[in-house]
Amino acid sequence: MTLTVGGRVRLVTDLVLAGSVTLAEGSPAEKEAVAGSLALAAGVRGLVERVREPEQPPEVREYVRLKSLLDDYGPQMPPGSRGRLEEEVASLEAEWRAFRERAPRVTVRVRLDNGFVLDDVPGDLFTSDIADTPDTTSDTTPDTSG
């Protein structure tokens, strides 16, 4: 699932954040070490403020571009051109597979409805919040039968 900036999301698992706490700049509190923990329950909703995709090497970007071109226009291409494109795609496939196997993580910044902000957390901790999507499938016509 792809998370998008401005999209509503829901936390899919309980989280416990523990360790040292950094006070916000300009806080009147003293600059002493503060430690604590915070528990967030699964189901907490929020808004995606930033999505950070892993940087793709040039070979991977080229593979994706050429593969898309081949998938979309390959059947319409002259056989010679299609063959050259297939060879280029095949030559870049190893780089693409290696990149996918490393499974680089997408990180996000989410402002939760309770005011907390989770920054640089793995995107797979969240799922799209379909509960905030209007339900157009339900019948809202009042029952007048009787």
Image (cartoon, grey):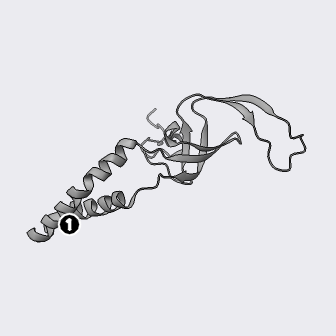
Mark 1, residues whose alpha carbon is within 10 Å: few (<14), some, or many (≥20)?
few
Residue closer to the observer: 106 or 42: 106
Q: Where is residue 15 in the image (x, y as percent from the top left)?
A: 60, 30
Residue 73 percent across, percent down from the top left: 20, 66
Say which quarter of the image contains residue 36.
top right
Residue that appears at 70% across and 41% down: 116
Q: Where does the N terminus fall, quadrant-wise?
A: top left
Is 77 on the left-hand or right-hand side of 99? left
| 15, above or below 78, in the image | above
Q: Would you place residue 52 above or below residue 131 in this image?
A: below
**Amino acid identity at mark 1:** Tyr
Residue located 17% across and 64% down the image? 74
Q: Residue at x 54, y 52 (%)?
A: 51
- Please report the residue visible at 44 percent of the width from the left and 45 percent of the height from the top: 104
Task: State which quadrant residue 90 falls in.
Answer: bottom left
Q: Residue 12 versus residue 56: which sits nearer the camera?
A: 56
Q: Name the residue under label 1.
A: 73
Picture layout, residue 42 above or below residue 85: above
Left/right placement of residue 73 relative to residue 47 reads left
Relative side of 18 to 2, left or right: right
